[in-house]
Amino acid sequence: MFHLCSTNMKPTYHYIIRADKTNKEGLAPIYMRITFDRRKSLYNTGIKVLPKHWNPEARTIRKSHPKAKVLNLQLEELILNAMQIGFDLEKNNKLSSKLIVDKLKGKAPELFIDYAEGYCERVKSDGLVRRAKQVKVALNKIRSFSSKKLYFRDIDQQFLDSLKKYQVDTYKNISTTVRKDFAKIKLVFDDAIEKGIIAESPFDRYKMPKVQKSKKEALSFEQLKSIEALELDSDSSLYHTRNYFLFSFYNAGIRFGDLCRLTWENIQDGRLKYQMSKTARNNDPKWKDIKLNDYSFDILKQYRTNGSDTDLIFPLLDADKELNDPVVFDKEKASKNAIVNIHLKKIAKKAGIDTKVSFHMARHSFARHAASQGMNIYAISNALAHSDLKTTQVYLKSFDENLLDKEMENLF
């Protein structure tokens, strides 16, 4: 129960649900009510639940809520933070319920690393395991750079400039890597602003490091055909790995994580229909609907059995593991992806290809082949499920040189 109070004119803190502020989805916000000297102030925690998930006696979120443990932990941490603010104000003879709320909304000192760790746990529970890992990588660099307790207010533009220099000097990070790390730190600040913990972010006026453009490697259609033509033992890992790679290529570069999850329910009326996984950039997954070609059907028929439609199509993951757990799935996916990439290097060598081949290259290769065949950029962008046409333009720019070579050959 989150209800903290005492005598001798001490503030009381407890949570209430505002059913009068229920939104269209039926979710009602949870507020902290702070009372001192018979005056009450409310603080919006930013957490919303269905009224049925709120326990008014215990003033906690019921266990029936799928994220009860995480959300209740947030509420507990928030009320302890409010108490600390109250203690600090009392020592300075400035105590009032309104001032406690004001401090919670943006002026309260907050340990950045502690908050960031909590953020990682929350996004991981939402299935964004990769984002949580990336934020933790950035946090570890900050820990290495500064051993003192850092508050949000300590991380200003001067701090970021010094951190950037430290990463370049110590970790030999290029500006693109620094930019990616800073983008993850910014996510934590954005979240703290949304929750009313801080009022502003140093990134609002900070000039982020430049992106150093990297050349995206892709296989030509001729190289792909040479891989397809290899004589491989049908019981070998190399044979199956080739199937996974080609199936991705023929289906608009489906990512490895999505390929792993495919079940026979995703094959409907000669089409591949699946929801793309959440990623750090894709928090609102899209549905893909692709017409299967003969090459894809030839691959699929090798894996069809008399099993259930809910069975995985490709024997990549350990079905005995709790794959619905995002942490378990991410670990299993990463392990199998590494193995597949090792097999792809062997396949490339057999096909006489010097390029370092990885599974993600199937996506690059699809984009290159589509552009070389005259598919317009809008169609390619849609096939790759890019949310912004500029992303596709950057994606294809790496292949311009190859396309120019072909045009020059045709010119003379």
Image: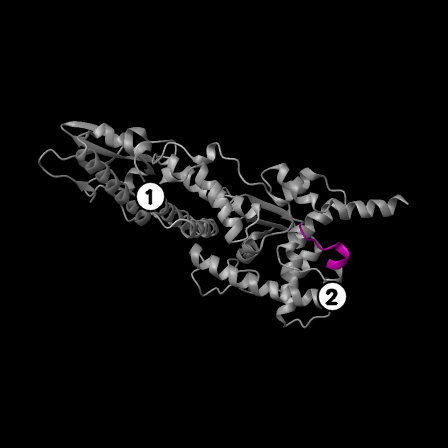
User: Residue 351 bears which disc, if any?
Assistant: 2
User: Residue 318 bears which disc, if any?
Assistant: none
Instruction: Give amino acid for label 2.
Output: Ala
* Nearest to the observer: residue 336 or residue 195: 195
For label 2, the crowd category at 10 Å Cα-Cα, with few meaning under 14, some 14 to 19 and many 20 or more, is some
Point 88% across, 43% down: residue:
411
Q: Which residues are magenta?
A: 216-224
Residue 220 falls inside the magenta stretch: yes
Q: Mark 1 to mark 2: distance in Å?
A: 55 Å
Point 37% across, 49% down: residue:
117
Residue farthest left in this picture: 8
Point 67% across, 54% down: residue:
249
Of badges 1 and 2, the one in the foreground is: 1
Instruction: Give amino acid for label 1.
Output: Leu
In the image, residue 337 above or below residue 366: below
Residue 97 falls inside the magenta stretch: no
Direction from residue 368 to residue 244 in the image, left or right: left
| Sequence-first disc among 1 and 2 | 1
Q: Which residue is mark 1?
A: 111
Q: Position of residue 349 (x, y in %)?
A: 71, 67
Counting labels gives: 2
**Residue 193 lies in what quarter of the image?**
top left
Secondary structure type for disc 1: loop
* Nearest to the observer: residue 362 or residue 322: 362
Q: Position of residue 287 (x, y in %)?
A: 55, 44
In the image, residue 167 above or below residue 228: above
* Nearest to the observer: residue 328 or residue 188: 188
Direction from residue 287 to residue 220 in the image, left or right: right
**Residue 45 lies in what quarter of the image?**
top left
Q: Position of residue 33 (x, y in %)?
A: 22, 33
